[in-house]
Amino acid sequence: MTSSVLDRFRGRVAQRVLVKEPLAPYTSFHIGGPAEYFYMPRGEEDLICALRAAKSLGMPATILGNGTNVLISDRGIQGLVVRLVETSLSPVLENGLVLVRAPIPLSVLLNFAMERDLAGLEYLVSIPGTVGGAIYMNAGSFSQAISTHLAYVEVLERDLTYATRRHEDIDFDYRYSEFQEDGAVILGAAFELEHGDGATIRSTAERIRSEKRAKQSWEHPNAGSIFSNPPTTFAGKLIEEAGCKGLQVGQAQVSMKHANFIVNLGGATAQDVVQLMDVVVHRVYARFNIRLSPEIRLLGDFS
Ligand SMILES: Cc1cc2nc3c(=O)[nH]c(=O)nc-3n(C[C@H](O)[C@H](O)[C@H](O)COP(=O)(O)OP(=O)(O)OC[C@H]3O[C@@H](n4cnc5c(N)ncnc54)[C@H](O)[C@@H]3O)c2cc1C
């Protein structure tokens, strides 16, 4: 991009656009090369302005939430990377619905619901992403998913027009939402939650939190579960039984604690992780004739 085009771009979004910003610090894996251009909007008008500018310049745009379910290429990401995380906003309760903006951390939504004895989101405890990232991934645990209690989702369509999609019109499945196909940006959502018994809600959340703490790896940077569970079993069980726990490529290691986690022992590259994932896929396939597919999203150039 020539400097005059860059100036035009900077002028349009009115705030600082970072050039060649390393992305590793914005991910829970602590892995990833630079964004060609990096932008953290302050509000939705700002976001739309940036996306419009990128579109008019023919520049691809990638949305990043809290970076807890991504593996970013060592070569980084071409075009504009927009990081949507906002910790100063709070959900609001309106006409029986909890309204929340996409960049808000899930933990904020969860606390908001629990403080008002609203039940249904307890299983999202300890998922370190944003509301937008969680809807995109249809995140959840213990056979529950965030989509269950959604009333509607507000999006910016690929052509940058606003739309509201009702829950019943959105295709959701296990760790799948139609947003993974159509490139819409999730702006916000409304949840319909039932009043419940506060003590029960809090004790359920606490039980899930401690079960996760006991099972998952928190000592080293990671991106949660690497592979989706196949329909009838757990990916972690297959990986462990295929003898992959502790396998290492470079500084990436199959966690000794939870076999479906890959941990960054310090300085792991995306290439290390991808090679390790390949080894795991081959070993599991050779042993069980089941091909694991990644749950994490690979962003950038992996060719
Ligand atoms: C220790 C640990 C434990 C975890 N436990 C769980 C668990 O129990 N259950 C579970 O489901 N997941 C779990 N995860 C994975 C992860 O936290 C979730 O998938 C989370 O919802 C991702 O949100 P994020 O904001 O970090 O998204 P990111 O990782 O930043 O992005 C994920 C994808 O969503 C897209 N995206 C993000 N925001 C938007 C938006 N506003 N509009 C459109 N696209 C968007 C990105 O482009 C990317 O493709 C865990 C991760 C870690 C590190």
Image (cartoon, rainbow, N blue to C red):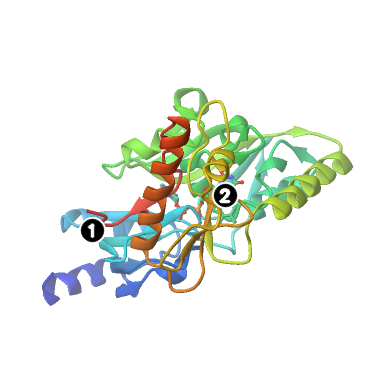
Compared to 296, does 272 lie above or below? below
Residue nearer the viewer, 42 or 300: 300
- The picture quadrant where one finds residue 274 is bottom left
**64 left or right of 209?**
left
Residue at point 41%, 67% (across, down): 250
Q: Where is residue 279 in the image (x, y as percent from the top left)?
A: 39, 49
Task: Judge depth for marks 2 and 1 and give the one in front.
Answer: 2
Q: Does the residue labelled 1 lie within 8 Å of ligand 1?
A: no
Amino acid type at mark 1: Ala
Amino acid type at mark 2: Ala
Q: Mark 2: which secondary structure?
A: loop
Viewer can see residue 136: yes
Q: Where is residue 4 in the image (x, y as percent from the top left)?
A: 12, 74
Residue nearer the viewer, 157 or 143: 143
Viewer can see residue 139: no
Placement of the N terminus among the 4 image quadrants: bottom left
Residue under label 2: 259
Q: Mark 1: which secondary structure?
A: helix
**How busy is the neighbourhood of tag 1: few (under 14 within 10 Å), some, or many (20 plus)?**
some
| Contact between labelled residues 1 and 2, with CB atoms less than 8 Å apart | no
Whichever of callouts 2 and 1 sits on the residue coming sooner in the sequence is: 1
Residue 54 is marked as 1
Residue at point 52%, 33% (across, down): 152
Q: Position of residue 75 (x, y in %)?
A: 27, 66
Q: Where is residue 109 in the image (x, y as percent from the top left)?
A: 65, 50
Q: Is mark 2 within 8 Å of ligand 1?
A: no
Residue at point 16%, 55% (across, down): 58
Residue nearer the viewer, 120 or 94: 120
